[in-house]
Image (cartoon, rainbow, N blue to C red):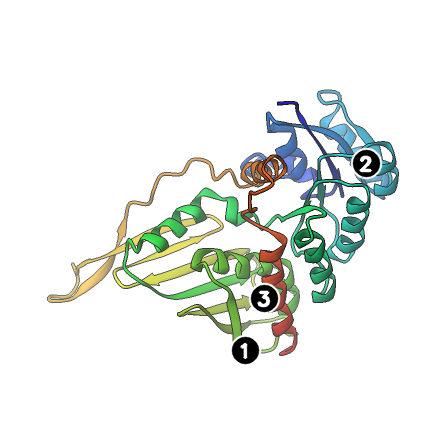
Amino acid sequence: MSEITCAIVGLGRIGSSLETDPLREKPCTHAGAMIHNPDCRLVAGCDIKPEARQQFISQWSPDYSFEVFNSLDSMLKNLRPEILSIATPPNTHRGLVQKAVRAQVPVVICEKPLAHNLRDARAIVRKHTSGQVRILVNHERRYSRDYQVVKEYVAAQRYGALLSLHGTLYFGKSAAHRDVLLHDGTHMIDIVNYLTGTTCSLKKRYGSMRARTSSAFLFGQAGAVPVSIEVGSGRDHLVFELELSFEYGRIRVGNGVFAFEESKPSPYYSDYRSLLLAEAPAIRYTNYFSGMLADAVKSLRDPLHTPLSSAEDSLEVMRFIQAAKALW
């Protein structure tokens, strides 16, 4: 098959520049994924900021050949990519998706969150469900092998039934809880939905979502599974972690965390059982970004394929965020 032409609007961190981070698994950006996918060819990038365009050129030239534009309008006037990544702020997503649809771009990848508000998110989803365009959303943990393994454990009931799920999210020492929820909390809500195979609904909140210290707690339900999420500030470190409690075990998965525990006769107390560390499945690479682009390629080539992270999935996340906003 011929190479699939790909382009990016938004050449900042997640669009391109994070690929220079020596500690991150590669690829870790839209540009990196497109360049390293053998089915794809990066043909263009655009950004309204001259410094972002220059950094993009310096980062990838002369090893790769592509065009650079200062607007999506000028890009789409000169070429029509088969896959377009939108890596711009969420309040721009609706307008950029509409331009892509008018230019008959067949597949669009949107960065999370899908939109700035629920109204715009619904409008984007309508473009997807109408068949005008296939829209994926980069809730990258759905494509990450560690989370996929955890989902396999849940589905197979390897440790019995999943009884509860707790998430911890710290992002920024002085960030308001509501901003943390909108920035990385979208990943948290989406991965809860993915792991449980259902949609998490918000029931109540404890603490202020406007505060910038300590924590606020959101309590919800994903099917039969009770869910609690701590959103915190005041810490000088990043934490994104899920703890899944089962009948006979526990799994912790998150940024830098992949731990499995099994119920066994306790070495500490007679006639009791304790959770003891078990060997976690070996995962060398999570392939989170490459998996996302492979899903976009499959969505382009197979009209019957349902994306693993679709616009509809992301709309459910936006509904949860909207419910949380009502409690702010």
Residue drawn at point x = 49 percent, y = 72 percent: 220
Quarter of the image for the C terminus: give it.
bottom right
Q: CA distance from mark 1 to mark 2?
A: 43 Å
What label does residue 136 carry, if any? Answer: none
Residue 154 on image: x %, y %: 36, 55
* Callout 3 amino acid: Gly
Q: Is residue 37 left or right of residue 286?
A: right
Q: What SS does tag 3 mark?
A: loop
First in sequence: mark 2 vs mark 3: 2
Q: How many marks?
A: 3
Residue 276 on image: x %, y %: 25, 55
Residue 143 sits above or below residue 56 on the image: below
Disc 3 packing (10 Å; few <14; some 14–19; many ≥20): some
Query: Which residue bears the numbered disc 3?
Result: 234
First in sequence: mark 3 vs mark 1: 1
Is residue 286 visible in the rendered image? The answer is: yes
| In the foreground, 232 or 263 | 263
Labelled pair 2, 3 in contact (Cβ < 8 Å): no
What label does residue 53 carry, if any? Answer: 2
Query: Which residue bears the numbered disc 1?
Result: 205
Residue 219 on image: x %, y %: 49, 74
Which of label 2 and label 3 is nearer to you? 2
Quarter of the image for the N terminus: give it.
top right
| In the foreground, 304 or 44 | 304
Which of label 3 and label 1 is nearer to you? 1
